[in-house]
Image (cartoon, grey):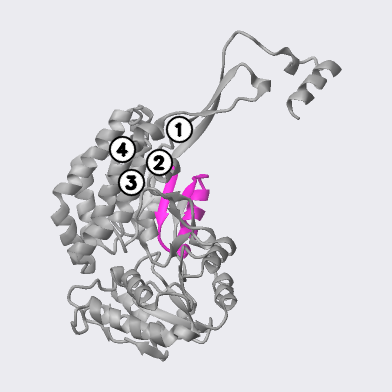
Amino acid sequence: MNNPLGTCFVQMQQFFKSGATLPLSYRLGALQALKQSILRHQNDIAQALQQDLNKPSCETYMCETGMVLSEISYLQKHLRRFMKDKRARTPMAQFPAKSFVHPEPLGTVLILAPWNYPFQLCLEPLAGAIAAGNCAIVKPSKETPHTGQIIQTILQECFEETYIKAVLGSREETNQLLDLPFDFIFFTGSPAVGRLVMQKAAEHLTPVCLELGGKSPCIIDKTADISLAAKRIVFGKLLNAGQTCVAPDYLLVHKEVKDAFLQAFANEISHAFGGQTFPYPDWVHIVNQKHFARLCALMKDQPIVIGGKTDALSLQIEPTVVLCEGLSSPLMQEEIFGPIFPLIVFEEFDQALAIVQSLPKPLALYLFSANKAAQRYVLQQVSFGGGCINDTIIHLATSHMPFGGVGNSGMGAYHGRASFETFSHYKSIVKKGFGLDIPFRYRPYTAKNEKRIRQFFK
């Protein structure tokens, strides 16, 4: 194999085929080793994320380290049950028999992580892969090198490289990995790159889970608690400076509450930063100059009503609201992935939904409304990955529900049991004994046998 990473990959395949990862005890031991190593390196993780993104330690624990530790604990608690065979009903035509579904690991899997939550979005899916009994190679993002280095340190401390390995590097290493015939690929990133990953995976018929993004709408109707809505929307947008796949991307606000909402939004921004002047010393910056320039270009010559300041030295952009007449604005042409909000005013609720449905299916949707009929209507009529009613972001912060996209925002899901299932194949088994054997399914076929067969399939 000419691929520089090929030898490592073959060794990992051989280790998986040995069956070492199959026992419950092995998987639980691996999860515990990972948890303990993360706990030992908490300060290192926080420092790495501060260096890469200027992420405050509180936000690092809330959105990165803490979520990974919580996911590991959940998997440890429930893994024995997840691994059990699932009984299934046996058709009368197959009597006497026992039917069940048996989960097995997919094999050797690849996890490609993004830069926006570089620790959480690398190790949370890895925990699911370990729980399901796989071997795995993880590829942290080149945009967050300090976090990638601590991930590599943690994994080297816990595991042999024939079991779990971190590969650092840039596009060249990613392409080398995608050329290998993995049994499964888990990718988090943009829809554009997701298409490329899927194309490469198709060459080996490798299944994929794509956690992508898109323009996640935030609808505020005239029945909403405007003050609380503004507070929760600001929370969701300020996390990671808006560089979150499920961040509220654009605002759809009823005309009767627009002015009140803008005032409440401005007040919440001021409160969030405690009266500090921009740029803010304890706020996440835009990941690099390229993305900073892209965001600045999107705001150029737009009607800004809140914020709008930029600082090239710190790579920060002030939380900003831009009034838009409709979908023609540059801010409505792509996922923003930054602290900028295009705001569109609507008069009738159907107008807001028409805008949402005219765009590709989003990863998240947020509705602020006290109208239960409106809540039901949105859930029934609009397709999106997941979301919240009267809040933002928090639907993904649980191991008790699957998280994933639909259509342009992704395919497949993970978190908790969904992670175990994503990294598993379920074998359907019918187990029969050697005793009683129903004869009419065998040749030679007769009219009498056909009549009996038809009776079973009614």
Tell me which label, 1 or 4, sits earlier in the chain. 4
Circle 3: element type: helix
Give above or below for 89 relative to 370. above
State the residue position of label 3. Answer: 126
State the residue position of label 4. Answer: 77
Name the amino acid type tagged 2: Phe
Q: Which circle, 1 or 3, is nearer the viewer? A: 1
Q: Which residues are magenta?
A: 183-208
Tell me which label, 3 or 2, sits earlier in the chain. 3
Residue shown at the point (30%, 72%) measured from the top left: 238
Q: Position of residue 152 (x, y in %)?
A: 23, 49
Residue shown at the point (39%, 82%) measured from the top left: 261
Front in this rendered view, residue 414 or 272: 272
How packed mark 1 is, by other alpha carbons closer than 10 Å (few <14, some 14-19, many 20 or more), is many
Marker disc for residue 195: none
State the CA–CA distance, disc 1 to disc 4.
Answer: 18 Å
For residue 334, side relative to residue 383 (left or right): left
